[in-house]
């Protein structure tokens, strides 16, 4: 910061005020503005794919194809979905009016909330910044974007590119870390969309409370995966290994740990070894498909979770290269270091429990996870999991890929977050559905319930309100 640069809080103040002026001026409301912005964002993702993928490679060692799958193409699919359905989503919906209020006409009219703040984390730093942006723009809001400073190449790339494609008056990127985010949080927003850890979520919610700003909190936690021997172990192991080691395990919905009966766990481990080999070859370090840990602090944190006595696959690492091999710990127990907090890295503990009953008890005794997975062909068990457990989402016989269905709202419950987005759910969280009603002055039926009260009013209440 030079001596001419205003202090952080004044920069935040001025930038939010400028964006609010754009919103108040009405430019973000018309559908043509929204669709033009969405198309421009799509153009950016196509024309600048190489730059975006290079930044992801630098920050997370993510190869271009994985970046396409989980970031740029993912976003393009969300944009295409929004463009296809936006007219329908934004159309006022007719509301039925009860007989007691007839004649009258009621509609729900979606309106934008105003100025939205999106705070993104580092693990899918493009997707998690821009997917909320798609919903916010589709709903007609102005937006302040705060990328994660922990993925610095992506933050700098997006801060450079976004102003070149989107309406600079209504969509701005504010780079920075804790101080800059803190300064932004002192401003008044109409919605705050935060993705990240639950400690910062508390900071966000506290700041939001000051202005009574609604929040969406997309958090994490330990997502369990139950597997029993009713399924094809080889196929299951392949899906589990992909979901766990994608982005080197730094995925909020990655299976955090496995739950299995002792015999199933024993059978599964060699299949996991083969699956890891199939996906990443003899030495995952040399595989372009295998990513890196975001920084050395996280490598060091993760290494404390690997108990050499339980390490049956992987364990190799190189702090300088931010590399940790796909690692499986077996048999793990609830007391292990790896079972205390969300792992958020390529370490998979296999916890043995007696049976499915014990697995359900294990899951229910812990905070509600962002995702719960079960690999089983037992229909009755699947239904029990639907009925007896609570999680952001529940997926059978696969993991992580449920995020690819735009009409499946994505979000947590309890400790894993509040509010859900993607597809129409994104449009809904950034909209207020305003009830608009008109009741003509004639015939003046409302008079039937006005004072002076007497038998007639009593009859009207009974006939129209209670029975009507
Ligand atoms: P992070 O460190 O990048 O932090 C997220 C954002 O919060 C950043 O923009 C950062 O600048 C800001 N921030 C950090 N400290 C702050 C403070 N004290 N005050 C104000 N702002 C602050 O990312 P992270 O939190 O390490 O992300 C990982 C977590 O996010 C994991 O728990 C993961 O499960 C969760 N996550 C959830 C989802 C989801 O969609 N539910 C997706 C990805 C990650």
Image: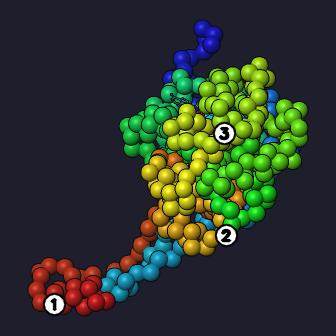
Quarter of the image that includes the N terminus? top right
Q: Kindly report the distance in space between the C-alpha atoms of the residues bearing marks 2 and 1.
A: 63 Å
**CB of mark 2 near ligand 1 (< 8 Å):** no
**SS of the residue at dot 2?**
loop
The answer to which of marks 2 and 3 sits earlier in the sequence is 3
Residue 227 placement (x, y as % from top left): 65, 58
Which numbered circle lies on residue 218? none
Which numbered circle lies on residue 377? 2
Quarter of the image that includes the C terminus? bottom left
Which numbered circle lies on residue 456? 1
**SS of the residue at dot 1?**
helix
The residue shown at (67%, 29%) is 308
Q: Is residue 428 above or below residue 24?
A: below
Residue 240 placement (x, y as % from top left): 72, 52
Could you tell whether 86 is left or right of 449 in the image?
A: right
Q: Is residue 94 above or below residue 424?
A: below
């Amino acid at each position: 910061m030079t001596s001419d640069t205003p202090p952080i809080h004044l920069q935040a103040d001025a930038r939010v005020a400028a964006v609010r002026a754009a919103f108040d001026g009405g430019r973000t409301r018309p559908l043509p503005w929204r669709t033009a912005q969405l198309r421009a964002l799509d153009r950016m993702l196509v024309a600048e794919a190489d730059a975006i993928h290079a930044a992801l490679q630098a920050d997370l060692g993510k190869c271009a194809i994985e970046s396409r799958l989980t970031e740029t193409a993912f976003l393009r699919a969300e944009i295409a979905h929004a463009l296809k359905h936006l007219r329908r989503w934004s159309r006022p919906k007719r509301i039925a009016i009860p007989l007691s209020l007839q004649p009258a006409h009621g509609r729900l009219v979606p309106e934008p909330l105003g100025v939205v703040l999106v705070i993104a984390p580092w693990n899918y730093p493009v997707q998690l910044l821009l997917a909320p942006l798609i919903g916010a723009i589709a709903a007609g809001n102005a937006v302040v974007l705060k990328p994660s400073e922990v993925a610095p190449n992506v933050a700098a790339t997006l801060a450079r590119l976004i102003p070149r494609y989107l309406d600079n008056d209504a969509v701005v990127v504010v780079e920075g870390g804790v101080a800059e985010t803190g300064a932004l949080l002192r401003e008044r927003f109409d919605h705050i969309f935060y993705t990240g850890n639950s400690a910062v979520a508390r900071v966000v919610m506290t700041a939001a409370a000051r202005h009574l700003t609604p929040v969406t909190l997309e958090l994490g936690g330990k997502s369990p995966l139950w597997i029993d021997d009713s399924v094809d172990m080889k196929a299951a192991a392949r899906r589990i290994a992909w979901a766990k080691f994608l982005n080197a395990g730094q995925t909020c919905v990655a299976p955090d740990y496995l739950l299995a009966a002792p015999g199933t766990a024993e059978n599964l481990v060699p299949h996991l070894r083969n699956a890891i080999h199939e996906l990443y070859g003899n030495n995952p370090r040399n595989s372009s498909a295998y990513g890196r840990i975001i920084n050395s602090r996280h490598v060091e944190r993760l290494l404390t979770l690997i108990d050499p006595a339980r390490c049956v696959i992987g364990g190799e690492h190189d702090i300088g290269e931010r590399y940790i091999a796909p690692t499986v710990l077996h048999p793990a127990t609830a007391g292990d270091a790896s079972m205390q907090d969300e792992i958020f890295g390529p370490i998979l503990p296999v916890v043995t429990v007696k049976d499915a009953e014990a697995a359900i008890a294990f899951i229910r005794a812990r905070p509600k996870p962002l995702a719960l997975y079960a690999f089983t062909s037992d229909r009755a068990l699947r239904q029990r999991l639907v009925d007896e457990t609570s999680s952001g989402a529940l997926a059978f016989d696969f993991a992580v890929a449920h995020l690819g269905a735009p009409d499946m709202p994505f979000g947590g419950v309890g400790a894993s977050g509040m509010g859900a987005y993607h597809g129409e759910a994104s449009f809904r969280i950034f909209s207020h559905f305003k009830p608009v009603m008109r009741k003509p002055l004639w015939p003046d039926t409302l008079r039937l319930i006005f004072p002076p009260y007497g038998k007639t009013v009593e009859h009207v209440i009974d006939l129209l309100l209670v029975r009507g």
